[in-house]
Image: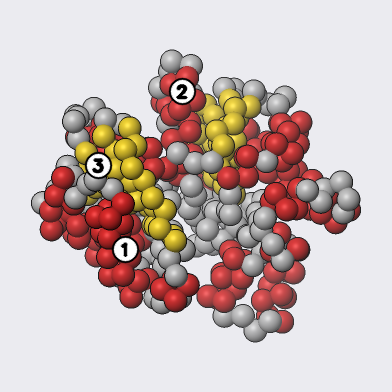
Amino acid sequence: MARILVLNLGSTSSKVAVYEAHKCMWHETIRHDIQLTSASLIEQKPARLNEIISSLNHTSDYTLKSFDAIACRGGLLKPMQGGVYHINNEMYNNLKAFKYGVHASNLSGMIGYELGKELNIPAFTIDPVVVDELIDIAKVTGLKNIERRSIFHALNQKAVARLYASSIHKTYEDINVIVAHMGGGITIGAHKKGQVVDVNEGLLGEGPFSPERAGSIPNDQLYAFGYNHNFTPQEMNHFLSKKGGFISMFKTNDLKLLSDKYDSNSEVKLAFDALAYQISNAIGARSIIFRGQVDQIILTGGLSYSKLLVQKIISFVDWIAPVTIYPGEKEMDTLALRTSNVLDGKEKVKAYS
């Protein structure tokens, strides 16, 4: 029975868990001090590693030497097919150098690789955010040499699609589903027979706006906005991904707080209705790739706990296909399950090169 250490590091916290036989035996979310998270990611790594080890030693019955493998959230890497990847030296170096972008998720693979080397056990990453299975026509834009990118909640989207397939006694490769992951960022993917053939780029908020992201903006107004504020490209990226959406409108990203004001505040009502409309609009756009043959629409992510938002979306899209809701995210369970499948010989591991 394999014992797996699961690492899922985000910008302000580190999720750590221990799994045995697909069952979570222990988990903790370590909330990091702002003094630490304000430092560069490379500077954060030693402190985060120490906090993870300390948490294991003091609040669990497990020691590092008791693990058979490490499963890590995927970071920003070069585009790749979905699957389970062994974190090799090349992947580690790409993550450590932030070659393909700077994001806290890179720390998961970096720490997992270093621990794996020390303990002489394998470290894996599964369906990182850069999974790219887009069909060619979905990448084309109206400017030569600029293509749409595939950066989205691949791990959770594929996880809930597999869960749905299992619930109807089929495989992921047998179904056509549209998955909307709705959280701080929102991505809507068309999953066609096991491949995400179209999805909006979630890192900077292409598509619907979200509690934090600006979403797609008219080109001329976006350019003028950046120009008038003297933003560098990096500053513009930060603004679009961290200070847009409900934060820009209402100075908060708390959906519960805003939904409580839905009936009493006309501005909140309009914004809330617009969020549901834009998500639904993107779901409708994804449906064309299937020419109407959509098995299911799946809503997931933290915002899917909102009954008000979910019901409004369903009212727009249930004519396309039935709707299933998987609230929250299944990332930790999926990291452990897919790693266990590799160890048991049920799934092949892929090489990053």
Nearer the camera: disc 2 or disc 1: 1
Q: CA distance from mark 2 to mark 3?
A: 25 Å
Q: Characterize the local packing of mark 2: few (<14), some (14-19) or many (20 or more) Cα atoms within 10 angstroms.
A: many
- Looking at the image, the residue that sits furthest to the left is 120
| Relative to 149, 334 lies left or right | left
| Relative to 329, 310 lies left or right | right
Mark 2 or mark 3: name the one nearer the start of the chain. Answer: 3
- Report the amino acid beneath label 1: Glu
Q: From the image, tell me which residue sits under label 2.
A: 165
User: Vertical placement of 162 versus 273: above or below?
Assistant: above
Q: Position of residue 149 (x, y in %)?
A: 49, 54
Between 320 and 10, the residue placed more toward the observer is 10
- Report the amino acid beneath label 2: Ala
Mark 2 or mark 1: name the one nearer the start of the chain. Answer: 1
Q: CA distance from mark 3 to mark 1?
A: 18 Å
Q: Position of residue 89 (x, y in %)?
A: 18, 59
**Which numbered marker is on residue 68?**
none
Q: From the image, tell me which residue sits under label 1.
A: 51
Q: From the image, tell me which residue sits under label 3.
A: 4
Q: Residue at x 35, y 68 (%)?
A: 98
- Report the amino acid beneath label 3: Ile
Kind of element beneath mark 1: helix
- Looking at the image, the residue that sits furthest to the top is 169
Kind of element beneath mark 2: helix
Q: Characterize the local packing of mark 3: few (<14), some (14-19) or many (20 or more) Cα atoms within 10 angstroms.
A: many
